[in-house]
Structures are given as C-alpha cells and as structure tokens.
Amino acid sequence: MPRKDPINIIRNIGIMAHIDAGKTTTTERILFFSGKIHRMGEVHNGATVMDWMAQEKERGITITSAATTIYWNKYRINIIDTPGHVDFTAEVERSLRVLDGAIALFCAVGGVEPQSETVWHQADKYNIPRIAFINKMDRVGADFHGTVAAIGKKLTRLPVPIQIPFGEGELFKGLIDLITMKAIVYNATSLGALWGVSDIPDDLVPEAAEYRETMFDAIASYDDELMEAVLDDKNVDPDLIHRAIRKATLAGDIVPVLLGSAFRNKGVQHLLNAVVSYLPNPAEVGEVKGIDPRKDQPATRKPSDEEPFSALCFKVVSDPHVGKLNYLRVYSGKVEAGQAVYNPTTGKRERLNKILQMFANKREEIKEAFSGDIIAAVGLKMTRTGDTLCNEGHPIILEKMDFPKPVISVAIEPRTKADQEKISDALNRLAEEDPTFEVSTNHETGQTIISGMGELHLDILTDRLMREFKVLANIGQPQVAYKETIRQKSRGVGKFVRQTGGHGQYGHVEIDIEPAEAGVGFSFECLVGQDRIPKEYINPLSQGIQEAMKTGVVMGYPLTDIKVTVVEGSHHDVDSSELAFKVAGSMALQDAVKKGDPIIIEPMMSLEVIVPDVYLGDVIGNLNSRRAHIKGIEPKLKAQTLRATVPLAEMFGYATDLRSLSQGRAVFAMQFSHYEEAPDKMQDQALPNSKFTLR
C-alpha cells in the first residue's frame, strides 16, 4: 500500500515554552484554523482539546505531551503540545527527542522566563531548528523589542524578526510583514479568520525599513540571488527571502521571529505558514544514528521507506480503553498493523496489534505507518520509554534519552487490604509511563516510597492513583532526596570466605575510591590482571559495589559521585564464584567509604523570582532565612528579577509565603541545579534512617 503523504510534506513539530506563555491556547487556535475542531476551547474554562486529563482541566496547565495531526495548505503537521512546568521536564525532553522542528513561544510581557531557557537548551541538545512566536501582544505591558533583545542575550541563536507589531498592548491591531513590506490588520468580527492587507502607515515605515535591513544582513549570505538583489537595491522577490530564511533556519544559525495574540486569534495562520516554509521535513533532518548490537559498531538509518524498519518509543500511556499505548516515532522503513517487530534492548519479539493516529486522547486506526510518522501502537507488552523497535534481521539501538533523577520523595500506604492489592500494579503502571517517577521500598520500615521531580509532580501522580486506579492511600510529608559522597581518597578491603564442607566461597578484592566529578554518579576501573581476578568475576564485582552504593554509611542515603579502581585481589580455583566476588565488592566499598570522610549532600535548586520593587526587601529577607545564595537582581519593567540557588529542603511551602509577602503579585520558578554539601549542623546530627513518617 503506497504512503498517503509524501515525506517532504510532513512536519513533526512541538510547541515549547514557560508555563502560562499560551502554548495550549496557540495549539487550540491551530486546530481551529486548520479545520480539525469547529469550536475553540479556552484553558480558563477547562475546555481545551489538548489538555484532556482531569488534572489539566482543573489546574489550567499541561501535564502530559499530547499529540495530534492537522493539515495546512496540503502539508501534514504532527504537533506535540508539551508541558511548561519544570516538574514535567521529562515530558519535554522525550518529545524533543523525536521532533524535527519546534515553535518556541514567548510571552510578550514575561519575555524569556526560566523554563523558556530550559526547554531552549533541551532543543539545542538535539539540534532542533525552531521559529519563535511572541504571544500575548494584546496584553498591557507587551514589549516585542525587549523580548527579541532578551532572546538574543540569553539564548543561543540569533533572533531575526520577519514581522514587527502594528501597535502593542490594547492598541495591538496586527503586524507588519517585513518580507512583503505590507501591513496586516485583523478583522475582529471574523475571529481573526480574515484580515486586510494595506500599505505600511507612514510613522512605521522607518522602523520597518530598519528591521528589514537587519533581516537581510542575517540571511543574504545564504542565497547568492538574494545577495545580488539586495546589493543592487532591486525589488526583492519574496520567494528568494523565504528560501534564504529556510536555509539559515535549517542550519541552526537564526530563529525567525513572528508575533501575535493566540487568544485574540491574531497571527496564528501566519505562524502555520512559517512552520511549513521554514521548518524541516523528516528527509531534511537526515539519517538517525544508533548502534548495531551484533557488532557493537555505529549504525545509521536514512529517513526512507526503503530502509529497514526502525522506530523509537518516546512515551508510554496506560489507556483505560485499549490498555498500554506506546507512542512511536518511525525513523526508517514502514510497518503494518499485526506485524512482528524486534526490541534489541530486551532481545524480545513484540507484535503491533494496532497502529493508531492520535488526536489528543482520541484516535483513528490506520493499517500502515511510514518513515517520518508519529503513531501510537497497541500490543507492545515489554517496550518501555527509550526502547528501539526494528527489523530483527537489521537490528539497531537508537540513541537513548537521559532523564533527570528524582529529588523529592513521599511515603505512601494503602488504607485497606483491597487497596494493598491494587497499589503495586497501579504504581508500576505509573512508573512505566513516567521515567522520572520511581518506586522503592524502605527496607528498614517496610514502607513504599515514591519519588519525583517536585511537589506538583507527586501531587498529580497521587491524584491520578486515586482517580484512575481507584486506590485510596495515605500520603506522607515530602522528603528531600539527600545523597552521600566522600571527600578524600581511601582504600578498602573486602574478603568473603566461607567453608561449608563441600565447595566453599572465596572472593578477595582491594579497591581505591576517590571523589568523582559532580553528576558522574559511579565510575569503575579494574587494574588487576586475570591471574588475580578472572574476567568472569569482574562484572559481579562491579554489581556488588553498585548495590552497596544504594546505602551510605552516614545515614543510609544512596552514595554518588565516586570513582572506584580495583587495585588488588585474589581468587581460589575451586571456591571462587560470582556471588563471592559480589559480596567482596560490597564489603570493600563499605570499608573504603568509612575511611573516605563521608558526607551528606543535598539537592540545590535554581530559583527565579519576579517581584514588584516594593516587596523586594521582604522577599530577599525570606530567602536569606532559607539559606539561599542570591546570584543577582535585574530590573524588569516595574519589577525585579531575582536569581538564587537555594536548598530544596528549605523550599516547602514557599509558594504560600511568597503570595503572603507580595500580596499575590510575585511569581517564581524553580528547577534542580546540582548537589552540594549539606550544612555542618546536619552532618553532626545522628538522625535515624527511617526518615519517612505518615501524617
């Protein structure tokens, strides 16, 4: 069966921004103007299509990345609307991994906000071409020029406006198109569906000419014909300008900047035109890199239907109607419903029982998927986020996604025996969906501990546990994910000898440990020859050390950022075993850590507070009482932007305090930064290991 849409008319894009910049509203308008929906929902009414979860409707925020497909001017656009709250940064990460282009949305009043920077740098990691859309131009305090300047100052690519505003704030009427040098004024009675094109008003001509000159300076070198026309001062063909902007955008050198007000339906159609004009199709992104697991050699797949099938699972969802849904990006080849595929990560065969094209939480069944498609699959039992699916005869493991580790935990306890039976299955299904959600057991107390990226993250997950899985549970107070590490190099010995009549057990190892760079976690090197420790015992030895790192010696927190080097050891021809070396490795690590000046380290958060001038002193005083390090203060309109790093342990209840201090006028954003040595007072306290208490 031939493919429905040629690969060159497909665009796989995401919409990314800080919370409250208008991502979901913009997506809703895109769906309306493309004919996908016939009535626009509003976030504040809980009536949007893309925010379909009960928690999203209630809170007015996006929690999960929703996928949908639209058609615009014969182009097929697969859109993923990503969350803006930092607690759901993994949702953004896995969406960006499979996208070819992105719309970076900025609030004309807020400018470049903290999460805008975070998602921008995530997009840089995957080298994603993007266009910028400055939204909310109708709001009081809108500052187009200031926002463009902030993008240029704080972010990594050159912003090049291809439109400038015709009025700002309450006087916002439309935009000036720098490519055609015409004014576009929207018809208010047509909900933005109609607009008039006229000459630029005289008072805006000098500004438009200056911005057009700046645009040419940025793009002319990408097209010889355009360069020639600009130098000869001819009337420049708009097609030449579009061509040069596309080349510069795909090269990652510029970001075309557009503007509008999604809520007022202004600028959205021009944004869609820019998506199909300037963002790449899957063929232009080029081949995808991976590893051939048979040879452990680099391998690639071209974005072609003729190549062997390969796809990446970037999201897993528990669906009440069809069970487990796996979202896949098909990078090469094609696949049919009912076909068997191979998962080289697990070494298992799986079957795609059904292939679905998604529209938020609705779906349409299709028979076949091709390279460049984003689909959902039913029937994959063992495939998890980050796994590759491929043709068994041509295996490839595509580059995995890295997710941040949880920094906050709570204890959870089922209320009844019936809940006890359901809770384990429910938690495992939630952990399958979300790579930043972890479930563990405190062996000292027997309690179940759930860990996530922040208070809101855990709040949403426990809410889902009760609503979707009908599990009633008591939730403990949030606890910080402390860790332990060492300050100095030390040596440890582990000798495990057991004689039990027949074969005994013998394992002996000596290791040096030293502090590793922050964020490394664990590194392992063996300098001992096979005559001392045979090759088959090295892996179990490493596993034993890693298992021992789960429990530190100060207060039982996990150990991290330690480099382990095996420097000596011995074995017995008869009595040595994998188990013996695993135990010896564990003993050696415990011995070495005790001598390595072990310390507790705590998670530090990057904090940004936007606060009116009058409340600045009170906010700083409050932060100082929370052990914050103030990094800097910058003026922003009639407010101040304060940046600081602060221990997560001190930030519980901060939202309430900040509202009280500023009469509700200050806002803040916070995200994990790094681990740092905890204060001496905490190091000296011999707190019990059973830290989790239920309220």
Image (tube, rainbow, N blue to C red):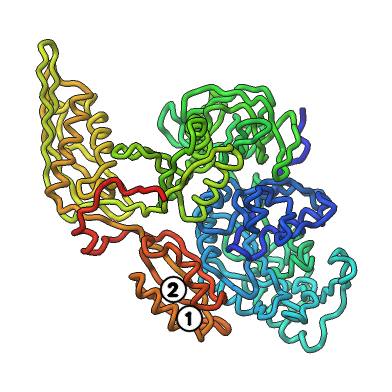
Q: Is residue 424 left or right of residue 135?
A: left
Residue at the image point whose x is 72% and y is 30% from the top: 368
Which residue has dot 2 on it?
643
- Res 154 seen here: yes
- Res 331 seen here: no
Q: Amino acid at mark 1?
A: Glu
Disc 1 to disc 2, C-alpha distance: 9 Å
Could you tell me if the residues under marks 1 and 2 are in contact, i.e. CB atoms within 8 Å?
yes
- Residue 460 screen position, x and y as percent: 55, 50
- Identify which residue, 475 or 31, lies in the foreground: 475
Decide: is 340 above or below 93.
above
- Identify which residue, 419 or 155, lies in the foreground: 419
Q: Is residue 221 left or right of residue 363?
A: left
Which quarter of the picture shows residue 277?
bottom right
Q: Earlier in the sequence, mark 1 or mark 2?
A: 1
Give SS at disc 2. Answer: strand
Residue at the image point whose x is 40% and y is 39% from the top: 448
Which quarter of the picture shows residue 181?
bottom right
Residue at the image point whose x is 43% and y is 47% from the top: 451
Q: Quadrant of the N terminus?
A: top right
As drawn, which residue projects farthest toward the bottom? 203
Mark 2: few/some/many CA within 10 Å (<14, 14-19, 20+):
many
Decide: is 409 above or below 318.
below
Give SS at disc 1. Answer: strand
Decide: is 223 above or below 687.
below
- Identify which residue, 360 or 122, lies in the foreground: 360
- Residue 124 screen position, x and y as percent: 52, 57
Q: Amino acid at mark 2?
A: Arg
- Residue 71 screen position, x and y as percent: 79, 48
Decide: is 341 above or below 433.
above
Which residue has dot 1 on it?
634
Q: Is residue 688 left or right of residue 36?
A: left
